[in-house]
Image (cartoon, rainbow, N blue to C red):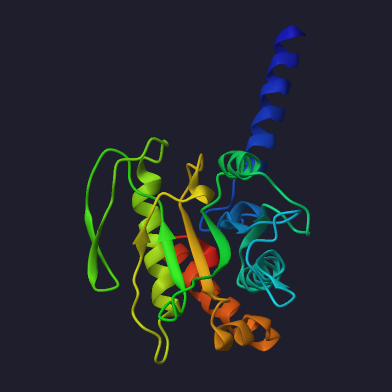
Amino acid sequence: MRLRLQLAALALAALLLCRSLPAEGAQPAPASPSAQAQPQALVLLDPGHGGDDLGVRVGGTDEASLALDLAQRLGAALAAGGCQVAYTRDSASGVSQEARARLANRLRPACMVSLHYNYSFSPAARGWRVFVPPAQGRAVALPGQGENLVLLAWDQAQGQAAALSHDLGAALAAALETGASAKRGVQVLRLAPFRGVTVPVALVEAGFLSQPDELKQARDQAARQALALRLAAGVQAYLRGRGFPGGR
């Protein structure tokens, strides 16, 4: 009796195994869409200033509001291109540099872009600027504005992020160099928005509010939208180079 029960159990197991195997020549079932999906690139956008800190103010126009609007336009363009987007601030509220850095280091985005506007008392100061942080423990000459800019040792842990930051800055600068725009390249400086950040990061100064024509452009919604699309193209070019699907 016991032997018959054992044989019956073995026969049932064999039948179930055969049903689970595909027929000869059959194609395996395709993976589910969720299994096939590649991870989207996460981009962290950092509108400068906020709260009581309005940044540059000219004739009722403040840098903090312009930077937030530009960040939201850039974020929408990136999301439409397949990226995930996060913000260090998404309202007029202020955020400390320490909180911005903590968020960046916790989220570990593919890149972080800090957005600002500029001001100068020099009538010759015009146009956009792209800055990246210096690398740690090495010195490298980089071209920018017709002169060599040197990467200096930096006390924040950047590691590989420093080289990737320059790649990001170069992609943004290339996207901004349109028409008669001067080729300003990437400038390497130790700036406050880089403090404590250990992910690839670049800072864009979108124009000089001290220049009447650039102030007019900054106030113009269509011009800000066009600028956001150029910046999105730069971010996507960087992501494409890193193999992210959001870089299309």
On the image, the x and y values in percent for residue 35 come to 62, 51
The one nearer the camera, 58 or 183, is: 58
Residue 49, quarter of the rendered image:
bottom right
The one nearer the camera, 49 or 174, is: 49
The one nearer the camera, 209 or 180, is: 209
Q: Say if residue 94 shows up in the picture.
A: yes
On the image, the x and y values in percent for residue 208 come to 53, 76
The reply, left or right, for residue 245 in relation to residue 167 is right
The reply, left or right, for residue 184 in relation to residue 235 is left
Residue 170, quarter of the rendered image:
bottom left
On the image, the x and y values in percent for residue 227 come to 57, 80
223 above or below 156? Answer: below
49 above or below 172? Answer: above
The quadrant of the picture occupied by the N terminus is top right
Residue at the far top in the pictured view:
2
Q: Residue at x 22, y 52 (%)?
A: 140
On the image, the x and y values in percent for residue 172 come to 44, 70
11 above or below 168? Answer: above
Q: Residue at x 64, y 82 (%)?
A: 225
Q: Which residue is drawn at 34% across and 51% down?
A: 163
The one nearer the camera, 165 or 183, is: 183
Residue at the far front in the pictured view:
121
